[in-house]
Amino acid sequence: MTSYFNEMYQGDSVRAPYARLQNWMNSMPAELRQMKQAEAEALFRRIGITFAVYGEGGDPDRLIPFDMFPRVFSGAEWAKLERGIKQRARALNAFLVDVYGRGEIVRAGRIPGRLVYLNEAYEKAVAGFVPPKGVYSHIVGIDLVRTGPDEFFVLEDNCRTPSGVSYMLENREIMMRMFPDLFRENRIEPVDNYPEILRRTLASVAPTKCDREPTVVILTPGHYNSAYYEHSFLADLMGVELVEGQDLFVEGEFVFMRTTEGPRRVDVIYRRLDDAYIDPLCFRPDSMLGVPGLMDVYRSGGVSICSAPGAGVADDKAVYTYVPEMIRFYLGEEPILNNVPTWQCGKADDLKYVLSHLNELVVKEVHGSGGYGMLVGPKATADQVEMFRARITANPNNYIAQPTLALSTTPTFVAEGIAPRHVDLRPYCLVGERIELVPGGLTRVALTEGSLVVNSSQGGGVKDTWVLAE
């Protein structure tokens, strides 16, 4: 039987970061816990924090389950994570500038050219263009898992439009409302300045033609998008306009926003839609969500798009395997955070190993996300394993495989009381003139006993993430 690292307990003793939570946990009778859980759900529902899942019937505005038991990191644990996350964000951005420029890492034979230049996320439309401050990925969501006291692994990088930050902020808000005494007893680093840092980051990458205080907007696909709540939430907290493609237009060298007082020039667009839909004159001609002519203005220095079109080539799951090499190549440093060992099915030897060990491995689509298109071998049925075997054999380049990690657990409130459940972590690293991240992130929790799949789209929940001030 696999043993898992429990973040609260070491044997029979409580680990230091959780020391002040034991009394709180033991002094909460079941009735109070149920009452508080109902209160939290009512708050989420009232605020409107919902998550739509595409292709599902039922409630399109369902709540993501919220677990009241916080996850806690010591200041020292966080300091290591912060260094590793910032290192990774620097290397990923250096890689993007390079592969849209001279491609030195490919020339040096450190990454296969086909993984970059034949990648569906590689956008030829921005080849040769260097965005302001040399930043392609402005919001980097790095998914981390823990397997021991000092063992952290990067599961994947999200360089395009990582979502979930609204849950990080609202989880904290609701915990502070419901358990103010906990916050008086523990010195917990704040996360509520994230919108302010995000706005500062976006303003710091204003385009060369911006000669005044930059006007920042958030571009959303609209209210049918599963993360629309987050788009409007961030726009509200940053004090910027939330716009759809039809609210913007191009005239001459600039982009303008339609307002009741007439057109207003826009300098920085924080876009929350995929590359393919940004500009129908450059990408998908049938897109009704984008702004015709936007890419011409972008390339001529009239507007900044965050994150930059083409950033997705850095978070491909096959390219992920080369991020440690990027860190060595661009920064001349050893990686602080390790990758999960990964087999690329496009390589003959790796493919052979994967096909003969499918029931032991986690298999993922190279461009998959949200827990879709994924096989968790030890939990899969024989039919599911054989279905994936056929898929991988038909298109090996489309898959990678990883060992089933012994993800750490944290105490979680469940129907029968308190029980360990598996968790991961997504911190949000902001890259502009400076690289910054708030101390915390989104902890996702697999609420089903034994499950290792934490994604909200697969029934996972969320919890507040504390970093203790040293």
Image: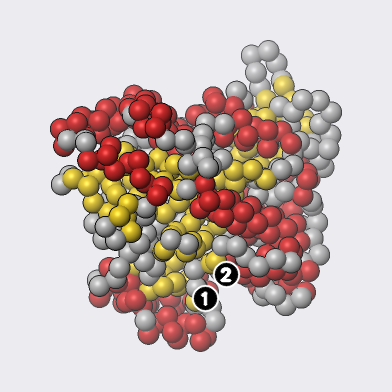
Type of amino acid under label 1: Gln
Q: Residues within 10 Å of mark 1 (few under 14, many from 20)?
A: many
Task: Identify the residue at horizontal 47%, vertical 62% (top origin).
Answer: 150
Q: At which x and y percent is residue 436?
A: 64, 43
> Is disc 2 placed on a helix, strand or loop?
helix
Q: Quadrant of the N terminus?
A: bottom left
Above or below: residue 114 compared with residue 175: below
Name, please, the residue furthest toward the top: 261
Residue 337: quadrant of the picture: bottom right
> Is disc 1 placed on a helix, strand or loop?
strand
Q: Contact, CB < 8 Å: mark 2 with mark 1?
A: yes
Q: Which mark is residue 344?
A: 1
Q: Residues within 10 Å of mark 2 (few under 14, many from 20)?
A: many
Q: Which mark is residue 465?
A: none
Q: At which x and y percent is residue 396?
A: 49, 76
Alpha carbons under labels 2 and 1: distance apart: 8 Å
Above or below: residue 470 compared with residue 381: above
Task: Identify the residue at horizontal 68%, vertical 13% (top origin).
Answer: 261
Which mark is nearer the camera, 2 or 1?
2
Q: Which mark is residue 321?
A: 2
Residue 464 horizontal side relative to residue 102, left or right: left
Q: At which x and y percent is residue 321?
A: 57, 69
Closer to the N terminus: mark 2 or mark 1? 2
Q: Nearer the viewer, residue 27 or 87?
A: 27
Regarding residue 250, the answer to whether it shows in the image is no
Residue 189 horizontal side relative to residue 374, left or right: right
Task: Identify the residue at horizontal 81%, vertical 25% (top origin).
Answer: 212
Task: Identify the residue at horizontal 57%, vertical 50% (top origin).
Answer: 79
Q: Nearer the viewer, residue 357 or 293?
A: 357
Type of amino acid under label 2: Thr
Q: At which x and y percent is residue 409?
A: 33, 56
